[in-house]
Image (spheres, coloured by chain):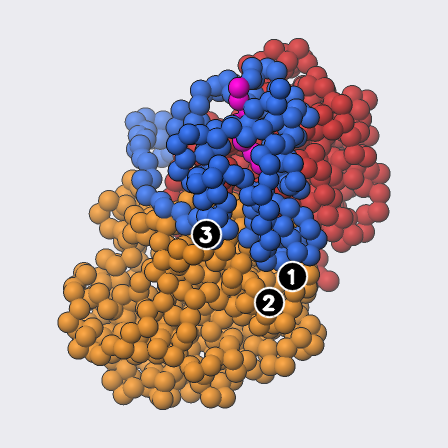
Chain colours: A red, B blue, C orange
């Protein structure tokens, strides 16, 4: 099978109430990515955007960014979901032989709209929506179930927040770099038990663009240093209604990861992956998803976290960027995570650069409580 | 020159997408809600292939993709699988004032859980594993709020 | 290079103005079940799923997640694509690329819409820039009426020309048991129907429908094994225009012209009018059924009225267009363009019932939407 490379990344700085329109944000990110790849905009032959009509408050909101994404007169399409899924579709289109160089862009201007109202609309209008449930209260149900199933403590989840906000101190891009303690998290405002303010990610504005290229184009257009290979990918969804699932069971993620690992030739992810960007919109999610990703056994995520395994200097650093807890541009969160992984693999992460990294894992999510997952393995 | 941007009085236009919606409930959930409304009963349906019982009922088995034609009445009692106490106000969305408790309740006789309120109890006292029963509204309209909440069985 | 891909099954709901018997997921399940039956498969045979619709018609966020029960997607790979009116062809193209990439063998592509659940024009209006064009110039009818009045002035096309297209599509729908509007209509009926926005009259315009369509794509190996006459995908192309309506070219249809030119090249077609046996085109308004024919390279700019008056595109003409009745008869928006793909596939597979064009071997299908953008597919009986 032909290989696909990421040859360029570009993004806006994270912001709240950004003075830019979301189209201007996409233009900035895409212009930077094209420049980063060292190509011309005319080298791009198709575009995949990740857009949400809900977050943008606009029907067919991808229409509004098409000029900005360099799509005039070109083949453009739209995935409605996290940027990791848009990247997957970009890769498919290249593997089909139809395209050479693809822009994958995602934008999010969450501060323009109501997060609770929009995520409430992810619930069935015929059943749960009337109860007023949203992303935060459903996540709280999942966090509690996870605690009860494995006897975990809120203090252990708080450690994730401490670690990731601490990591953000070394990443100038992050929105919320903070030196905090477990007590700070525990004493922060209660939102929906067991979640407190510092267990939750801040809704953030930001656009991110990746440039993907088929091997033949990648080798022609860019240097070896710029190329990061998309080695494996898998995606899978669990059932829709929260009550259909054991919310502490990560079977859909495990299936997605298995597919990605098989494609990348990885048999022992805990050993073969050097670092990971794992979806952590809420603190408890990081250990839960690490279990689903097969990096630790079920119920063991928090224990390994306490041992420091996932610290920047640990055996498998997780979310050295500061994670979603330090900036969460929902629709573009996954693409930012991929861009972070690319820059780490290229050795361009400056103050938070990890040493000797060859293989990265990036994880993105669609739906409530991690209903659907997309897992990427990227490598040099 | 790019400098002009520093002096711009940046405007924000307020808007609300006001599109009216009327959702078709469909045959399966209509039957479920009519039983709630007319008889204050909770009905579930069962997969003929794997035997899984769904409450709320489903149009297809999520595992077998079989049509579900077998209906079963549930006793209205169940167990709290997980819960949360919501502390923030969201007046447009929440039908009640915070703090209040949501739970996922696995009904006796069902294999799936139902999200609902847990009431008639201090929210701080709610626990997983708690036995609960459905409390119905007196005036029922044929929707999920016909169940007022689930309360602990004392 | 990519794998060859064939369509091996198609299913659609019985479309109607209001399907009160079925919720959105029930509509989806109806189409999916019929597609599985058409392909003689079960859900266990499906490796991945793609779904699409337009968010603000039903107000459901993360439709791919919500629709799991109807899609049969629990514990399967699934995601959503959406591009407005073109959503159906976008879903079809996505199903095609899933398989052509070599990542999945058998893929289910599903489009749906329950337009009865909202105010369609109110929702469409929000596609225009909220600080620029939303108030003065938005919705579907105004821009289409504007472009045809320009075309009439430029080339001498008439209101009767578009009325002939409306009558053709509406009468074809009489042969399609799934069509929403099945009503015998004369050119005079169309001319006498109420004016919506000059020169577009009520019977020129598509309805809004409840419905769903599902199409199953498979690799060459699987398609040959599972289907006696698959419809092979020969080309899938999208072309896009500027963001603002005010920037668009209105006298012809640039994206259709560019997309069809690119697709014809891929499929080795030099004389489309001669080489296609049937076309299922996204003609949302009969006026487009005149003007846009120029942009499909069937004739020079301005040549379409003559072809229409000659009856070239009638069921017994040289190139029957919309044997199904097309969009003017049936329009569940997120499914509409996928129905074009499904109907074209059935023509190739010989499964189009009373609307079958005998011996159809090459078919063209299109989607239209957004800021005048085109998604286009070419299907054939022979391997590409």
Instruction: Check if mark 1's residue and mark 2's residue have beta carbons within 8 Å.
Output: yes
At mark 1, the secondary structure is helix
Height in image: A178 above or below A217? above
Given the image, what chain letter belongs to the residue carrying mark 3? B
In the image, is A71 to the left or to the right of A327?
left
Given the image, what chain letter belongs to the residue carrying mark 1? C
- Kindly identify the residue that appears in the image at 52 percent across and 83 percent down: C350
Real-space CA distance between mark 2 and mark 3, rounded to the nearest whole angstrom: 22 Å
Mark 3 and mark 1 on one chain: no
- In this view, the residue in front, A285 or C379, is A285
Query: Where's residue C219, x and y in %?
Result: 66, 70
Q: Single out the mark in the foreground, 3 or 1.
A: 3
- Kindly identify the residue that appears in the image at 36 percent across and 85 percent down: C315
Q: Earlier in the sequence, mark 1 or mark 2?
A: 2
Residue matched to label 3: B26
Height in image: B7 above or below C368? above
Q: Disc number at residue A361?
A: none
Residue matched to label 1: C43
Query: Where's residue A143, x and y in %?
Result: 65, 27
- Kindly identify the residue that appears in the image at 25 percent across and 84 percent down: C309
Q: Disc number at residue C36?
A: 2
Residue range corresponding to the magenta coloring: B114-120
- In this view, the residue in front, A355 or B107, is B107
Mark 2: few/some/many CA within 10 Å (<14, 14-19, 20+): many
Query: Where's residue C300, x and y in %?
Result: 31, 80
- In this view, the residue in front, A240 or B73, is B73
In terms of secondary structure, what is the magenta stretch mainly? strand
Real-space CA distance between mark 1 and mark 2, rounded to the nearest whole angstrom: 7 Å
Mark 3: few/some/many CA within 10 Å (<14, 14-19, 20+): some
């Amino acid at each position: 099978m032909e290989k696909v490379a990421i040859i360029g990344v570009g993004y806006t700085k994270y912001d709240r109430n950004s003075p830019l329109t979301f189209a201007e944000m996409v233009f900035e990110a895409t212009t930077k990515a094209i420049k980063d790849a060292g190509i011309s905009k005319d080298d791009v032959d198709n575009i995949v955007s990740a857009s949400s009509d809900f977050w943008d408050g606009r029907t067919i909101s991808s229409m509004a960014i098409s000029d900005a994404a360099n799509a005039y007169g070109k083949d453009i399409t739209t995935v409605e979901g996290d940027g990791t899924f848009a990247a997957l579709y970009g890769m498919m289109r290249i593997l089909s032989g139809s395209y050479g160089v693809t822009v994958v862009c995602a934008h999010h201007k969450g501060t323009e709209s109501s997060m609770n109202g929009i995520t409430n609309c992810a619930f069935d209008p015929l059943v749960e929506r009337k109860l007023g449930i949203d992303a935060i209260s459903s996540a709280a149900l999942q966090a509690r179930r996870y605690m009860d199933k494995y006897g975990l403590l809120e203090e252990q989840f708080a450690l994730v927040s401490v670690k990731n906000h601490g990591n953000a101190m070394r990443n100038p891009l992050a929105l919320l770099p903070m030196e905090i303690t477990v007590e700070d998290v525990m004493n922060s405002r209660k939102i929906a038990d067991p979640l407190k303010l510092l267990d939750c990610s801040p809704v953030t504005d930001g656009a991110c663009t990746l440039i993907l290229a088929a091997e033949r184009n990648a080798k022609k257009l860019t240097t070896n240093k710029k190329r990061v290979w998309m080695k494996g990918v898998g995606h899978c969804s669990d059932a829709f209604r929260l009550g259909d699932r054991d919310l502490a069971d990560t079977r859909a993620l495990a299936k997605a990861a298995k597919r990605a690992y098989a494609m990348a030739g990885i048999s022992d992810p805990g050993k073969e992956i050097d670092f990971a960007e794992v979806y952590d919109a809420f603190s408890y999610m990081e250990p839960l998803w690490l279990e689903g990703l097969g990096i630790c056994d079920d119920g063991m995520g928090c224990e390994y976290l306490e041992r420091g395994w996932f610290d920047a200097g640990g055996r498998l650093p997780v979310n050295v960027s500061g994670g979603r807890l330090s900036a969460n541009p929902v629709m573009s969160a996954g693409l930012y995570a991929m861009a972070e992984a690319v820059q780490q693999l290229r050795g361009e992460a400056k103050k938070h650069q990890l040493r000797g990294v060859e293989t990265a894992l990036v994880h993105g999510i669609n739906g409530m409580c991690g209903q659907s997952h997309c897992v990427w393995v990227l490598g040099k | 020159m790019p400098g002009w941007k520093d002096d711009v009085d940046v405007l924000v236009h307020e808007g609300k997408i006001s599109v009216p919606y009327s959702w078709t409930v469909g045959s399966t959930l209509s039957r479920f809600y009519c039983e709630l409304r007319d008889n204050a009963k909770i009905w579930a349906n069962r997969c003929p292939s794997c035997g899984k019982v769904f409450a709320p009922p489903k149009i297809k088995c999520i595992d077998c993709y079989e049509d579900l034609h077998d209906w079963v009445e549930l006793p209205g009692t169940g167990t709290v699988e997980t819960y949360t106490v919501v502390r923030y106000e969201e007046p447009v969305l929440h039908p009640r004032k915070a703090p209040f408790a949501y739970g996922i309740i696995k009904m006796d006789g069902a294999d799936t859980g139902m999200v609902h309120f847990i009431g008639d109890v201090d929210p701080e006292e709610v626990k997983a594993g708690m036995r609960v029963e459905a409390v119905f509204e007196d005036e029922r309209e044929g929707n999920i709020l016909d169940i007022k909440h689930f309360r602990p069985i004392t | 290079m990519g794998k060859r891909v064939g369509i091996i099954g198609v299913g659609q709901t019985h479309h109607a103005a209001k399907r009160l018997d079925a919720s959105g997921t029930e509509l989806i399940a109806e189409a999916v079940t019929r597609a599985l039956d058409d392909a003689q498969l079960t859900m266990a045979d499906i490796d991945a799923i793609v779904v699409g619709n337009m968010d603000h018609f039903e107000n459901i966020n993360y439709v791919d997640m919500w629709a799991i029960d109807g899609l049969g997607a629990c514990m399967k790979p699934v995601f959503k694509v959406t591009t407005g009116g073109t959503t159906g062809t976008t879903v079809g193209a996505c199903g095609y690329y899933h398989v052509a990439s070599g990542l999945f063998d058998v893929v289910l592509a599903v489009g749906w819409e329950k337009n009865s659940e909202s105010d369609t024009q109110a929702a469409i209006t929000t596609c225009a820039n909220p600080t620029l064009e939303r108030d003065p110039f938005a919705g579907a009818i105004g821009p289409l009426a504007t472009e045809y009045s320009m075309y009439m002035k430029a080339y001498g096309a008439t209101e009767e020309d578009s009325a002939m297209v409306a009558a053709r599509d509406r009468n074809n729908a009489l042969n399609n048991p799934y069509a929403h509007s099945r009503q015998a209509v004369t050119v005079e009926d169309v001319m006498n129907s109420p004016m919506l926005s000059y020169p577009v009259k009520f019977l020129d315009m598509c309805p809004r429908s409840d419905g769903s369509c599902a199409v199953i794509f498979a690799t060459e190996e699987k398609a040959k094994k599972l289907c006696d006459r698959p419809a092979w995908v020969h080309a899938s192309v999208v072309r896009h225009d500027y963001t603002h309506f005010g920037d668009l070219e209105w006298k012809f249809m640039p994206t259709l012209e560019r997309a069809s030119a690119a697709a014809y090249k891929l499929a080795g077609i030099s004389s489309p009018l001669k080489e296609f046996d049937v076309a299922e085109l996204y003609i949302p308004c009969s006026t487009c059924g005149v003007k846009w024919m120029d942009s499909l390279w069937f004739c020079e700019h301005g040549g379409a009225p003559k072809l229409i008056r000659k009856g070239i595109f009638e069921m017994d003409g040289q190139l029957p267009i919309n044997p199904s009745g097309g969009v003017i008869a049936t329009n569940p928006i997120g499914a509409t363009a996928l129905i074009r793909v499904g109907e074209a596939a059935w023509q190739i597979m010989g499964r189009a019932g009373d609307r079958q064009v005998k011996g159809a071997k090459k078919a063209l299908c299109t989607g239209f939407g957004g800021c005048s953008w085109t998604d286009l597919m070419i299907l054939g009986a022979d391997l590409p």
